Amino acid sequence: WADDETLEDMYALINKGITIKVVGKYGDESKDVIRQLLKLGAIVKLHEFAGEARFMIIDEKEVVFAIREPLTPTERHYIGILIKDESTAKTVKQYVFDAIFKEAEEADYVIS
């Protein structure tokens, strides 16, 4: 999910003073991406739950969910759901993201 274009966009946002927080799942596939995100200045934490859910909250106004279709272990297909509702975005941030982020482990301790 974090290709060069996405990383460049994140870097530009961080340079504008925007805080980017990421909760990910540590593994061989994610190690390099986590290192890159930390190098860009993103706040990265690790949590076991992170592998099961993919979503992002944009300015506490929108929520984008990526739900994996259970095809086969080798195929990854996702359905995207965009919710443009400030109340929903704030609720997901408060009760889902913030709770996971609070108990997640600092990535720089694990990666270094």
Image (tube, helix red, strand yellow):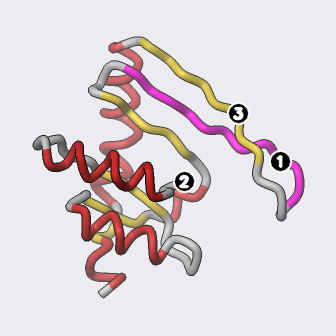
Q: CA distance from mark 3 to mark 2?
A: 14 Å
Q: Is residue 69 magenta?
A: yes
Q: Quick check: 20 above or below 95?
A: below
Which is nearer the eye, 20 or 99? 20
Residues rendered magenta in the picture: 62-72
Q: Are marks 1 and 2 in contact (CB under 8 Å)?
A: no
Badge 2 local density, few (<14 within 10 Å), some, or many (20+)?
Answer: few
**Which three-letter amino acid code belongs to the residue tagged 2?**
Trp
Residue 43 relative to residue 35: left or right = left
Q: Which residue position holds label 3?
A: 79
Quadrant, the C terminus: bottom left
Of all residues, the one furthest to the left in this rendering is 17
The x and y percentages for residue 33 are 44, 68
Q: Residue at x 37, y 23 (%)?
A: 89
Badge 1 local density, few (<14 within 10 Å), some, or many (20+)?
Answer: few
Which mark is first along the chain, 2 or 3? 2
Which is nearer the eye, 34 or 50? 34
Q: CA distance from mark 1 to mark 2?
A: 18 Å
Which mark is first along the chain, 2 or 1? 2
Q: Quick check: 20 above or below 60?
A: below
Q: CA distance from mark 3 to mark 1?
A: 11 Å
Q: SS for tag 3?
A: strand
**Which three-letter amino acid code belongs to the residue tagged 3?**
Ile
Q: Residue at x 32, y 72 (%)?
A: 107
Query: Residue 70 got which mark?
Result: 1
**Which three-letter amino acid code belongs to the residue tagged 1?**
Pro
